[in-house]
Amino acid sequence: MSARRGRLAVLVPLLAVGLLATPTTSRSETIEASEPFDGTHSLVGSYLAGRVAKAQNDAAEASEFYRNALIHDPQNELLLEQAFQIEAMRGEWSRAFKLAEDLLGVSKQHRMAQLALALRDFKAGSWKQAESHFKSAGAGPIGELTSAMAAAWVELAQNNTSDAFARLEMPKQAEWAQFFLRYHKALISDIAGKRNDARTAFERVYAQDARTLRTALAYSRHAAHNGDRKRALSIIDEQIEKSQGDGHPLLRSLKAAVQSGKPVNLIVTTPSEGLAEVFYGLGEALISEGATGVGVLYLQMALFIEPEHQFALAALASAYEGNKQFSDAITIYDRIRGTSPLATAVEIRKAFNLNSLDKIDEARATLAKLLEDETKPQSDSNAAPAAAVDTATSIDDDEVLRRGKRGDAVRKLQEALKGLGYDIDQADGRFGDDTRRAVIAFQNKNKLKADGVVGPATFRAIVGGNPAQLDSASLDAASDGRMPLTTSDKLEILDALGNIMRARKLYAEAIPYYDQALALISKPERRHWVYYYARGTSYERLKNWDAAEVDLQKALSLYPDQPLILNYLGYSWIDQGRNLKEGMAHIEKAVALKPDDGYIVDSLGWAHYMQGNFNDAVRYLERAVELKPDDPVLNDHLGDALWRVGREREARYQWDQALSLKPEPEDEVKIRKKLETGLTGADLPAQAVHGTGKQAAKTGESEEK
């Protein structure tokens, strides 16, 4: 028995104590008690409470419990590992680094602890120590890939270009890993001035995956930076065309820059940014494969190196949303600058998170402000078209200059700061400590946030030679540098407002937003079906069927193979005893298109029930409950069908199950009555189907957005 794992011989398996049973708990995860269990103040109690808090995504609580547990047993490997992970996932790096050192004291090869210390040493410029830690972290497929790519950027930081490329030569790696290796080879080739090698690598990466936005942005920036604006625009246009709309805001912003003739920077210009790109890319990939915990940790590592990496920030916020950590998601979204082309999309996501926190008024105000800002007069500099921008006094709207940056923009910044009287040794295009000190001095003098970081507004003020134009309000204003709203942006904002109202069953308040959205559309296209569908379902819930039918049929004419429309329209007809044959055909087509959608399968089963086809009803309703066992309406429907075919005991079981799932109050009353008396002949649906008075779970709207 290792002394590092505890001090007494009493072994307390987590599952045996019966206090923690989550899918993430391993049978091998045990901890030795040094004292009797005494609530959350004891070793065992603190550890168990920390595990529960972690499972509930309450990182702050988990952190406190683990800290308390470590007071009792400071060398316990399991406690150190859990405490380190939670602090790193929170981005609490000073605490995480101390825990990583302690963890390596008891487990020399701990991969994540080695990675954390490697990042710390890299940021401090301790290249050899960083390289050593990265090498020690190279266990397993992901660890080996991470270590190799990270080491390549460490080599580049030391100007060892050939060694950097050598680190990326891993022929035995799988093809998915080769994608990342080629991508980083392209990035390093560009920085090293090997344009042809960069182009070849980017072409292979893009051929392997042309769908990823980051890949398209990197390749198009490479092309534009190296003078091939035609190729850059073709990549951008290809991506925008795939979106069937105005395209991603970062693509639109880049397109404007390319067309204006202004210099376009590479997507990665420093070793620091390259290293952050390693952890961002792998972190997002891990999350997409379901490894959310490790993915979040990787994203936080990317942000430790580059705190304003907007892709990593957006990916981290999205991961928090997936874990229902809505407040944390908002906090991360707030770190994305208001000057970023992502600003409008960020505000929309924040509104949805506010709504999830039951802050509906704040959510509505957030979205309404976006539309109000659009109607306010813009300053001359913001209103100018891209082609009229003075390229000498501008950087990309999403660009930030900070320590470690290199390039022509940094040189211009340094020259301007020297011209303003600030102490800079030479304008060499390298953003070092002297440049940072000069920027901080400028910010302090002009009563701005003194962080040594230069965004577009600050850059314009310094390089343009007019510091007086800059104040805290103008720097922080979300509209400063934000791209003007496109029609697609306005549609998304109005759709978000309508959907928030609709999700809260405020259908009458939702409809005006859809009215405004549809008024913006001069020629409806297939992608606009959602607005007709949303307004139509809102009308139907308000029992205005005439208006609902017009919208639903319009939506279907735009998108004839959309399962949601087919299902809703078809079921609604059958519910009213109209267009029975056509309605049934619509629902059957919807099921064929989405056979694993429990709500749509339920609609087909309930349609059979209402027409008296009880055996067919049971068959489909059993399948629906299989697909969606936690929905009270589906369980209630199955109970009704089972009763009709004489399986009364099973019917009562399904009704009991429906009650346990917290149905709507009016449905609860009906279910309790059925449990008492069953169904009678008077409850039989008429052959023509005049409606049952109960709304089927026919939309799956809770999963739509």
Image (cartoon, rainbow, N blue to C red):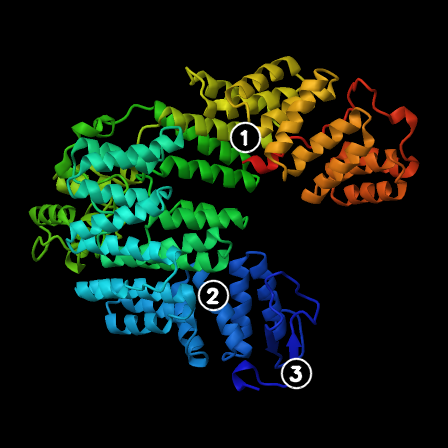
Q: Quadrant of residue 669?
A: top right
Neighbour tally class for label 2: few under 14, some 14-19, many 20 plus, Cα within 10 Å: many
Mark number displayed over residue 44: none
Mark 3 lies on residue = 10
Indicate left or right for 250 with 328 as reference: left
* Residue 553 x, y percent position in the rendering: 58, 17
Q: Is residue 139 above or below residue 250?
A: below
Of the numbered discs 1 and 3, the one sitting upstream in the chain is 3
Neighbour tally class for label 1: few under 14, some 14-19, many 20 plus, Cα within 10 Å: many
Residue drawn where x is 7% and y is 55% of the image:
426
* Type of amino acid under label 1: Asn
* Residue 56 x, y percent position in the rendering: 59, 56
Distance between the Cα atoms at labels 1 and 3? 55 Å
Of the numbered discs 3 and 2, the one sitting upstream in the chain is 3
* Residue 357 x, y percent position in the rendering: 55, 42
Neighbour tally class for label 3: few under 14, some 14-19, many 20 plus, Cα within 10 Å: few
* Residue 704 x, y percent position in the rendering: 56, 35
Task: Point out the residue furthest to the top here.
Answer: 546
Distance between the Cα atoms at labels 3 and 2? 26 Å
